[in-house]
Image (tube, helix red, strand yellow):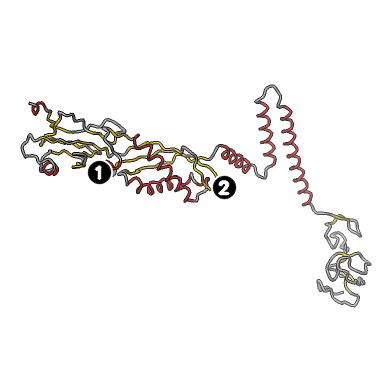
């Protein structure tokens, strides 16, 4: 009578309506029996696994199967069943979800330390998403799954999230990229993390199928310094703009305090800005003045001429004599050059170039003019 009280299962299937179940054990009570000739339905992205006495007996991919000794070797080998249609099977049935579980979150619980070529030792924080899937159901059942009736994504998420952050840290450290260049290489870094994860995740029958970096950021104080550096770069060599910038900041700070206690500070800020502007204006004026050509008066006609002119453009008079040895200007009647000490004979002066020459010289050694 106990045999007839058992419940024979004609169809075995799992209609997955969840979003996070990886392994589902088909509910069998002590009265449930799997018949030889029962129907097994395995849907897409599923694998069915029969376990007998703690050992994996058979694995079925997507499809519909008529359970019999012909297509299930363990029925005959392990249970020694007859070929009668009402033969009973005592085994556990597990369904493994092989779909991709997407949108899982990862983040750096503690900052990542790295050596940056621009800023030295810095700390990075980051976050993003990733996706995993069961790539080898048999290995996954042996390495990860216990005796629970349901195994969810959350059961593996905590463990492998740490592995992902560790892989990311290694990839960033080995890339030697500057912190300012990381954003332009998110895709390349993600692909490298996926590639590095194949061995570690594959050992448990899992696969990191997608990895997305949403953000890698520096500490807040470092980001503020970068912002200031960017602002200064925009106004570099523009002191007038800098003065306006500092003055506007001082006014803004004063506006935040209606009691006027910051007015003294505002005056100091305005005075400093005005002083900087004055210094800049004086520098520009001095530069312009230094660029102006120095002028003198002609020794003969008094016309205004360039300071370095040797002849007057008005009357043609020679303005200065030059040493025949070093070329430095000398005064008329001098016997020695004040620059090189050469003895001078200024009895003759070239009418063309103004060079002082000896009295017996017939042609100017500088310009060749006949004397």
Image coords of residue 363 (percent x, y): 84, 75
Q: Quadrant of residue 141?
A: top left
Q: Residue at x 27, y 37 (%)?
A: 97
The tally of labels here is 2
Q: Using residue 98 as the reference point, say whether residue 333 is left or right of it.
A: right
Q: Quadrant of residue 94?
A: top left
Residue 304, compared with residue 234, is above or below; it is below
Image coords of residue 357 (percent x, y): 88, 72
Q: Residue at x 34, y 35 (%)?
A: 155
Image coords of residue 289 (percent x, y): 79, 49
**Kind of element beneath mark 2:** strand
Q: CA distance from mark 1 to mark 2?
A: 47 Å
Q: Using residue 81 as the reference point, say whether residue 191 is left or right of it.
A: right
Asked whether the residues under the numbered discs 1 and 2 touch, taking CB atoms below 8 Å apart as contact, a structural biologist would say no
- Image quadrant in which the C terminus is located: bottom right
Which disc, if any, is residue 138? 1
* Residue highlighted by disc 2: 120
Mark 2 burial class by Cα count in 10 Å: few <14, some 14-19, many 20+: few
Image coords of residue 91 (percent x, y): 17, 36
Q: Nearer the viewer, residue 254 or 83?
A: 83
* Residue sitting farthest toward the top: 259
Mark 1 burial class by Cα count in 10 Å: few <14, some 14-19, many 20+: some
Q: Nearer the viewer, residue 290 or 133?
A: 133
**Kind of element beneath mark 1:** helix
């Amino acid at each position: 009578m106990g045999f007839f009280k058992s419940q024979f299962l004609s169809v075995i299937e799992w209609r997955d309506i969840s979003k996070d179940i990886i392994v589902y054990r088909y509910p069998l009570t002590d009265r449930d029996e799997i018949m030889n000739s029962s129907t097994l339905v395995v849907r897409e992205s599923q694998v069915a696994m029969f376990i007998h006495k703690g050992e994996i007996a058979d694995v079925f991919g997507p499809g519909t199967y008529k359970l019999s000794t012909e297509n299930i070797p363990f029925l005959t080998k392990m249970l020694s069943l007859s070929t009668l249609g009402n033969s009973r099977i005592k085994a556990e049935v597990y369904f493994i979800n092989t779909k991709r579980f997407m949108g899982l979150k990862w983040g750096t619980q503690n900052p990542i330390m790295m050596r940056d070529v621009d800023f030295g030792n810095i700390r990075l924080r980051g976050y993003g998403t990733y996706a995993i899937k069961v790539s080898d159901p048999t290995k996954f059942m042996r390495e990860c799954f216990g005796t629970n009736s349901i195994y969810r994504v959350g059961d593996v998420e905590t463990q492998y999230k740490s592995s992902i952050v560790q892989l990311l840290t290694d990839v960033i450290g080995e890339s030697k990229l500057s912190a300012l260049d990381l954003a332009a290489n998110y895709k390349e870094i993600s692909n490298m993390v996926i590639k590095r994860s194949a061995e570690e995740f594959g050992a448990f029958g899992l696969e990191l199928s997608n990895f997305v970096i949403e953000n890698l950021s520096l500490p807040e104080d470092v980001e503020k310094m970068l912002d200031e550096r960017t602002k200064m770069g925009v106004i570099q060599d523009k002191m007038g703009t800098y003065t306006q910038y500092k003055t506007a900041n001082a006014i803004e700070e004063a506006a935040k305090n209606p009691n006027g206690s910051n007015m003294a500070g505002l005056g100091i800020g305005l005075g400093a800005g005005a002083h900087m502007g004055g210094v800049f204006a004086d520098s520009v004026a001095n530069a312009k003045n230094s660029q102006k050509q120095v002028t003198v008066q002609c020794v003969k006609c008094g016309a205004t001429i360039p300071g370095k002119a040797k002849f007057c453009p008005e009357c043609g008079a020679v303005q200065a004599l030059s040493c025949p040895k070093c070329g430095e200007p000398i005064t008329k009647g001098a016997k020695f050059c004040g620059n090189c000490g050469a003895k001078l004979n200024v009895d003759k002066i070239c009418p063309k170039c103004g060079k002082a020459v000896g009295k017996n010289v017939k042609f100017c050694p500088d310009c060749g003019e006949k004397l």
